[in-house]
Image: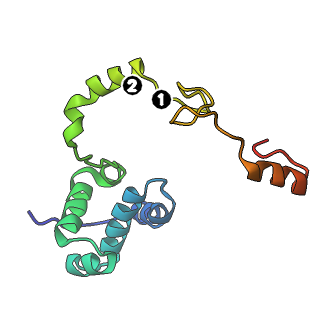
Amino acid sequence: MRHTFTFTEDERRALQHERFHHPHPLVQRKMEVAWLKAQGVSQVEIARLTGLGRRTVVRYLHDYAVGGLAALRQATVRQPRGELQQHVGELEDYFLEHPAAIGGSSPTGNRAFDGRQARPDPSASVFKKVSGCVAGK
């Protein structure tokens, strides 16, 4: 379906501003497409200038024709669903029952994996002598 685009002066100002200042980059890109169209640039040239596919340009302009600037301000991004998505509940349950050890709170205490007592890092004492500071504080 072909649309005839007419932009009011207020819309042109909004497009000019939001193509650089909208907080979401996707909305900025949509505003850039509409702004270029408001300047009389063809869809093929808009696609070339923006690096977008022609169908994407057509979709953005269709969104504008149907819903105006409000439609362009919608930043909906389709998130791909991975294979693990179907196991989210099971994974959450597992990690709630088996929290990760952080901050030196390992199940073996201050022992190396083979059971020996872990030694302090010798570079820490050198750093302390040279700088007069305690590493990590």
> What residue sits 28% from the left and 80% below the top?
41
- Front-lying residue, 114 or 66: 114
Mark 1 or mark 2: name the one nearer the start of the chain.
Answer: 2
- Badge 2, how many Cα within 10 Å: few under 14, some, many 20+? few
Residue 33, x across and y down, in percent: 32, 68
Residue type highlighted by circle 1: Ala
- Quadrant of the image for the N terminus? bottom left
Q: Are marks 1 and 2 in contact (CB under 8 Å)?
A: yes
Amino acid marked by disc 2: Phe
From this viewpoint, which residue is outermost toward the top?
97
Q: Residue at x 35, y 77 (%)?
A: 39
Q: Residue at x 24, y 63 (%)?
A: 61
Q: CA distance from mark 1 to mark 2?
A: 7 Å
Q: Answer with the quarter of the image where residue 112 lies.
A: top right
Residue lying furthest left:
1
Residue 16 location (% of width, % of height): 46, 67
Residue 91, percent from left and from top: 31, 27
Q: Which mark is residue 100?
A: 1
Check disc 2 and report its element: helix, strand or loop.
helix
Name the side, left or right, on which 127 lies relative to 69.
right
Q: Is residue 115 left or right of residue 97?
A: right
- Looking at the rendered image, the quarter that the C terminus falls into is top right
Residue tagged by mark 2? 95
